[in-house]
Amino acid sequence: MRIPTKVLIVEDEVHALMGLAELISGWGYRTETAKDGVEGYEKSLAWDPAIVVTDLKMPRMDGLGLLTKLTESSSKIAVVVLTAQGSVENAVDAMKLGAYDFIQKPVDPTRLKTILANASRQLDTELELEVTRRQLRQNGVLGALVGHSKPMQEVFGLIERIAPSNVSVLITGESGTGKELVARTLHDLSERKARPFVAVNCAAIPETLMESEIFGHEKGAFTGAVERRAGCFELAEAGTLLLDELGEMPIGTQAKLLRVLEERKLRRLGARNEQDVDVRVLAATNRNPEEAVANGQLRSDLFYRLNVFHIHMPPLREHREDIPDMVAAMLSEMNQKHGRRVAGVSTAVLERLQQHEWPGNARELRNLMERAVILAPDSGLIEVGHLPSGFSRQSALLAAVIDANSISVKVGATVGEAERLLILKTLEFTGQNKTRAAEILGVSLKTLHNKLKEYEYLRETGGLRD
């Protein structure tokens, strides 16, 4: 027989406290009460509840103070905060401090029951998820993400912390860094993993169809609406919705999205009645969100509501040490996808992959690996000849400079001095062919000429010696 989940209710208004205790115990939970944050914290230590439902405004210690102490003492308590109408900012502060969810007063019993049921299910799966994550982290893998590097481990840590909750998350990063993979991993490590994951690219939807795609429409809502259609929110019901490239969403649609996020109700275009929605919303953008707000492309209140937690995906050039692990994972995936048995990559190929600048980030690496797996022989290795010709030539030239004409820079030298030595050594390697040297160095011919003029001026004025 399942032991009832213990719920501690903390509320300074006596009638509200007794009413909540009666309501929650009627749903099969074991309940205990406290009249303020100080008493609530003392009872939480003695009684060890799984869930704490607390008001925010209380004497002696308020709800935020109680939440802070609870999260410091235990990460396993799910805290649900009660907030007055119009105090969403306080609720968002609570979510940032680690609250599981919030509900506005007067309390909607149906919503509270749903929140408690979700929190209880999350506690049941927490141990299983924790064991799984620990095993994956030891292998440098979290969901679809791969990496032992410090930047990726920091991303993993954030994902592990916030995946089990229902908080909104803003995911930023350059194009191709894996923002959607982060969103999928957040979904897969949450209690919503068995429910739908829906990703919609706002940049790919015409402005005239945006509201219909997001919120759905009734038959006859507009010209061409020949039948009722469910929007992305309905398709993701009880699951997760990723709004990719959020900055491309029209401002008017952003206002309606904000209302859905705050009230958790939506109305299809052309519909008379609203309907409840239970969807975790994640957002992603390759823009700087603060700049998008300043430029009027993103509503500040929507940004504030979505940016409860922020995960930034680093570009591949900032965690090159993960490339071997990523290549191994992609090779396994592509072998299975295309029915191949490619054994691995050669040392020469791996060197070129780690030297490349990766302007397209992980997406570029994935596309390159898929092409190479198709071209390479079964049971053989991916060789330099299986890489795109332009990629191979650039990498080979750079490797030649490093291997045959290496430079040595003493500790204490300036960055400018190291740059000068590299430029001059590359020119020496190319026989003073400036166009070819600029290509190897990854700079424009104009930039190279400007650098050389700077060195000549310094030499003439005695500021530089050969």
Image (cartoon, rainbow, N blue to C red):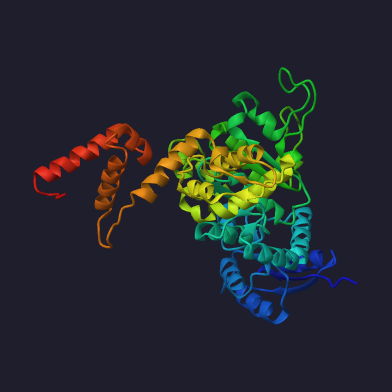
Q: Nearer the viewer, residue 277 or 464?
A: 464
Whether residue 83 is visible to the viewer of this picture, yes or no, is: no
Whether residue 355 is visible to the viewer of this picture, yes or no, is: yes
Q: Position of residue 138 (x, y in %)?
A: 63, 65
- Compared to residue 71, the image places residue 235 above or below, namely above
Q: Nearer the viewer, residue 446 or 343?
A: 343
For residue 200, what is the image quadrant?
Answer: top right
Q: Position of residue 375 (x, y in %)?
A: 64, 37
With 319 as the anchor, is 79 left or right in this view?
Answer: right
With 187 as the anchor, is 387 left or right in this view?
Answer: left
Image point (58%, 48%), residue name = 306
- Label count reads 0
Q: Position of residue 225 (x, y in %)?
A: 75, 21
Q: Position of residue 233 (x, y in %)?
A: 71, 40
Image point (50%, 61%), residue name = 150
Q: Quadrant of the N terminus?
A: bottom right
Q: Nearer the viewer, residue 134 or 10?
A: 134
- Residue lying furthest right in this view? 1
Image point (65%, 75%), residue name = 40
- Residue lying furthest bottom in this view? 46
- Residue lying furthest left in this view? 461
- Compared to residue 51, the image places residue 336 above or below, namely above
For residue 445, what is the image quadrant?
Answer: top left
